[in-house]
Structures are given as structure tokens and as C-alpha cells.
Amino acid sequence: MKTTSLFGPGLMVLLLYACAPTSPDEPTESTAEENTLQAIFPRGQKGSEDLFKGNAYHHGLIAPDSIFTTLAGNVYFEPGARSNWHCHPAGQILIITDGIGYHQIEGQDIEIIRKGDVVTCPPGVKHWHGASPDVGLQQLYVIPNTEKGIVNWQEAVTEDQYSID
Ligand code: MN
């Protein structure tokens, strides 16, 4: 188990333009325009491929300090993107501001999360979160008591684990 900063080193800003051509005979795929979610904050920097599957972007809002000992930021997950399994030594609060996503605590079913939902994960409990396959997710995270630690990253979420069928 390795403790790193929330999104790991080597962040890059990437602007993505999904322009896949579609045939009128095929089922209509979601377009980038249809998946544009309401963004309250800047998209930020792309998360490390070692820690996220697909495209996830992080924008920090509150840096931890000795007064508030609380970290907060926004993560935008493109459709299909999700974090690796991980735990937060002091727990985590997620506030969903747009889109549809998944949150799963190890040993429990995937929980579908939508705009307006507030989800908590207790301290030290292994979990992951991210977008649904077809709709992205805008989430605010709050990590309290950062003196206890921020995040311990673990293995990737497999395709089987990501599937809810
Ligand atoms: Mn988390």
C-alpha cells in the first residue's frame, strides 16, 4: 500500500476532442456534446494513468493546512472513467454536482450516484468511484482530518467489477 498525493506525480493538462464519425445505420453513440456536464469549477489536470482508468480531471479547491486539516477539490470523470480502489485514512465525503456515476465500497453492491447526492465513505474503507459508462460525473470531494493521511492507492477496478449487469 503506497501513500501518495491525491493524484500522483506527473500531471498533464489534456484537452480532448472526441470526434468519432458515426454511421446513420448504427445505434447513435453518445457525443461529447451530449456528455457535457455543468462545470462549476475549471476542469483541471488529468489524473495519472496509474491511478485512474480513462480520463479523470482534478481541480484542487482547498489545500490541507494545520488549521482546517481538510482537503477539497473537484473531479470530473469522463464516461467510463473511474479511480483505482483506494482508501482514505480519515474518510471521504463526495458531493455530486452533475452527471451519473458509480461508488462502491468493497463487499457491497455498486451504488449509482447522481447530481445532488452526497455519499460518505468511512475511514480506512476500501472503495472506488467514477462515472457511469455513458454519462460522466462531476464530483466534489472533501477529505477531513488530513493529519491522519489523505489516500492509500490500491489496484485498478477490473471491467468485471465495473459492470453492473
Ligand atoms: Mn475516495
Image (cartoon, rainbow, N blue to C red):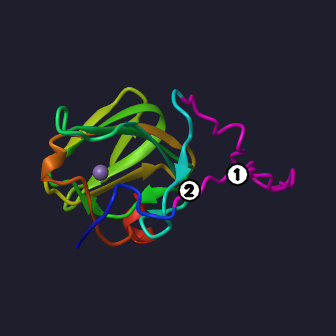
Residue 92 visible to the viewer? yes
Residue neighbourhood size for the residue with mark 2, other residues' Cα within 10 Å, grouped as few (<14), some (14–19), many (≥20): many
Question: For residue 88, what is the image quadrant?
Answer: bottom left
Q: Secondary structure at mark 2?
A: loop
Q: Counting other residues with Cα less than 10 Å from the Cα at mark 1, is it few (<14), some (14-19), or many (20 or more)? A: few
Identify the disc placed on residue 16.
1
Q: Residue at x 18, y 54 (%)?
A: 149
Confirm whether the magenta stretch covers residue 102. Answer: no
Q: In the figure, 2 relative to 83: above or below? A: below
Could you tell me how many numbered marks the image carries? Answer: 2
Q: Are marks 2 and 1 in contact (CB under 8 Å)?
A: yes
Q: What residue range appears in magenta?
A: 11-39
Say left or right for 159 vs 65.
right
Q: Is residue 96 left or right of residue 150?
A: right
Side of 25 where 100 appears, left or right: left
Residue 30 inside the magenta-drawn segment: yes
Give the x, y percent position of residue 19: 80, 52
Amino acid under label 2? Asn
Q: Residue at x 52, y 59 (%)?
A: 11
| 127 w.r.t. 137: above or below | below
Q: In front: 91, or 73?
A: 73
Figure quadrant of the N terminus: bottom left
Report the residue marked by disc 2. 55
Location of the C terminus (image quadrant)? bottom left
Report x, y in % for residue 114.
41, 34
Could you say whether the residue bearing mark 1 is in a helix, strand or loop? Answer: loop
User: Residue drawn at (56%, 56%), measured in percent from left and top?
Assistant: 55
Note whether 153 is above or below 65 in the view shown.
below
Residue 140 can be seen, yes or no: no
